[in-house]
Image (cartoon, rainbow, N blue to C red):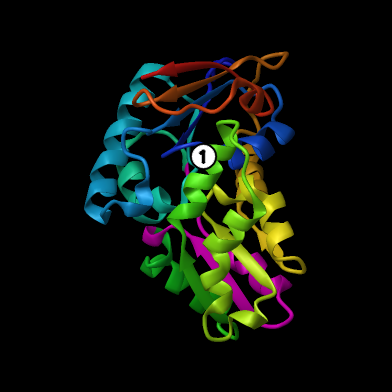
Amino acid sequence: MDPNAPILFFDSGVGGLSVLGPTLKVLPNAPIVYAADSAGFPYGKRTEAEIASRVPALLGRLVERFHPRLAVIACNTASTIALDHVRSALDLPVVGTVPAIKPAAEMSKSRVIGVLGTEATVRQPYVDDLAAKFAADCTIIRHGSPELVELAEAKLAGEEIGTDAVRAAAQPMFDAPGGDRIDTVVLACTHFPLLDAELRAAFPGVAYVDGGPGIARRIAWLTREQAWPGAPSEGLMLFTSATRTPSLANLARFGIGDVRTL
């Protein structure tokens, strides 16, 4: 394995930064290529058929260009719909992102769990399967919030995000029957951990769980015997269209210093 072979992160937007951050904590010298499919954003409003065809095609082009050692679909919507298609198409390890229902069930005292994601993710049978397997004794209340995705994108672009806007976007989940008993929320969209401070301010006393740290551990395990550069390098972030981009100051916190359009 070439020590300079990067890890490829893929998302519809900036959400995958919530997976990249924990990964760099365990693999600080890992070269990074982060691809944001801004031309297809937001995935949560696209059909399953669109995502199932679009994601493998884009990742195939990226793999040919950058020759990564591993690819990470750092997007719950893309993972729950297209992960099997991508693994069939690519000849390298592919790590997906799935809602962290198991750890949420282990934490919850009230046995009422919120699953906060995109509209596409929360309706997937995969969520039903995870709930049946790991949270059979819990009530699961789902809410798809495209507004929170947009708020996370705006925050990373340097815009001021108010707690009231975040509260309004997530409030329907707590207003649903039984929602007042939610004590643990699964952030089933990688954009949402980027709003962690705002969510905690809007709904104090609620615990939030996301898959970022677990995915980072999986990446570290899959690459455990591979060589890395001797020092950190500047990460590359690619967009599939000219769009509102994150501020360089915000990206620097994730090791990204080079931003381009694919």
Q: Is residue 60 above or below residue 219?
A: above
Quarter of the rendering containing residue 139 = bottom right
**Residue located at (73% from left, 34% from top):** 25
Q: How many marks?
A: 1
Q: Is residue 123 above or below residue 221?
A: below
Dot 1: element: helix
Q: Is residue 106 above or below residue 209?
A: below
**Residue located at (60% from left, 33% from top):** 223
Where are the magenta residues, as a range? Answer: 95-120
Q: Which residue position holds label 1?
A: 153
Give the image location of residue 106, x and y in percent: 70, 72
- Residue lying farthest to the right in this orientation: 205
Q: Can residue 97 be seen by looking at this rendering?
A: no
**Residue located at (70% from left, 74% from top):** 183
Would you say residue 118 sits in the magenta stretch? yes
From the viewer's perspective, is 161 left or right of 48?
right
Give, as a three-letter code, the residue at label 1: Glu
Give the image location of residue 131, x and y in percent: 51, 75
Quadrant assignment for the C terminus:
top left
- Give 176 or 208, whichever is nearer the viewer: 176
From the viewer's perspective, is 67 left or right of 58?
right
- Give 128 or 2, whichever is nearer the viewer: 128
Would you say residue 134 sits in the magenta stretch? no
Quadrant assignment for the N terminus:
top right
